[in-house]
Amino acid sequence: MATTVIFAEIMIMGIITLTWLLMLSLRLGLLPMNDLVNYLPMLKEWSTPVLILAAAVAYQLGSIMNTFSFGVMDYLWGNKIRNSIMSPYDCETASATVHQVGSSEIVKGVQAHITYSRLARSGLFNFFFLGVTLLCLGGSYRGVGGLFLLISAVSCVAWHTIYSLRY
């Protein structure tokens, strides 16, 4: 079950990352719109291999976004939050103790906090980049871009709260 959940989380992160990267590439002219429109009819015949390739790319991008967001958030705030509650040594000891002698419900609770923290953290970054990309597109996309920036801010508060509760 845990492996399936992590796979789904990483795929969702990757699909959102792939979305804003494609939109940003179109906006910056890295992907010519005319060529893309010409290739779309040909992709119908190759839909299965393209879907498999897109899923593989999305999974990798999700993994990269998860690692990137973890590193940035841990550097900026994670260590401060964790160290304000307990020393790094005590934190590692407590984590090992919970995983070795804790009941399955406690371990599931810890895993749930990790999952929620991961989702909030990646939401913060993905929605921020998606919002900025939509703002760059201009026009009617600006309102949606602003909404995604607001969701990013909410994700930041959610991450901070969830991360604090974990310790």
Image (spheres, rainbow, N blue to C red):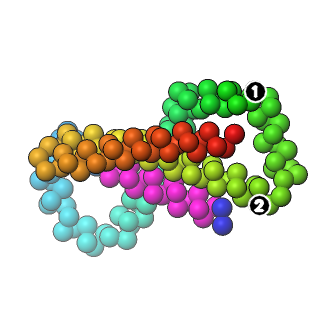
**Residue 105 to residue 136: above or below:** below
Amino acid tagged 1: Ser
- Residue at x 61% of width, y 26% of height: 80
Asked if marks 1 and 2 touch (Cβ < 8 Å), the reply is no
In the displayed structure image, the side of residue 102 where residue 14 appears, left or right = left
Whether residue 24 appears in this view of the structure is: no
- Horizontal and vertical percent for residue 47? 32, 70
- Horizontal and vertical percent for residue 158? 50, 45
Look at mark 2 in the image and give the residue it sits on: 105
- Given residues 133 and 98, the one toward you in this image is 98
Amino acid tagged 2: Glu
Q: Is residue 11 magenta?
A: yes
The residue at the far bottom in this view is: 45
- Horizontal and vertical percent for residue 23? 25, 48
Picture quadrant where residue 44 is located? bottom left
- Residue at x 20% of width, y 48% of height: 143
**Residue 166 to residue 56: above or below:** above
Q: Quadrant of the C terminus?
A: top right
SS at mark 2 in the image:
helix
The residue at the far right in this view is: 101
Residue 165: image tag: none
Tell me the magenta residue range.
Answer: 3-20
Look at mark 1 in the image and give the residue it sits on: 87
- Residue at x 82% of width, y 43% of height: 96
Of the image marks 1 and 2, the number of the one nearer the N terminus: 1
Q: Is residue 80 magenta?
A: no
SS at mark 1 in the image:
loop
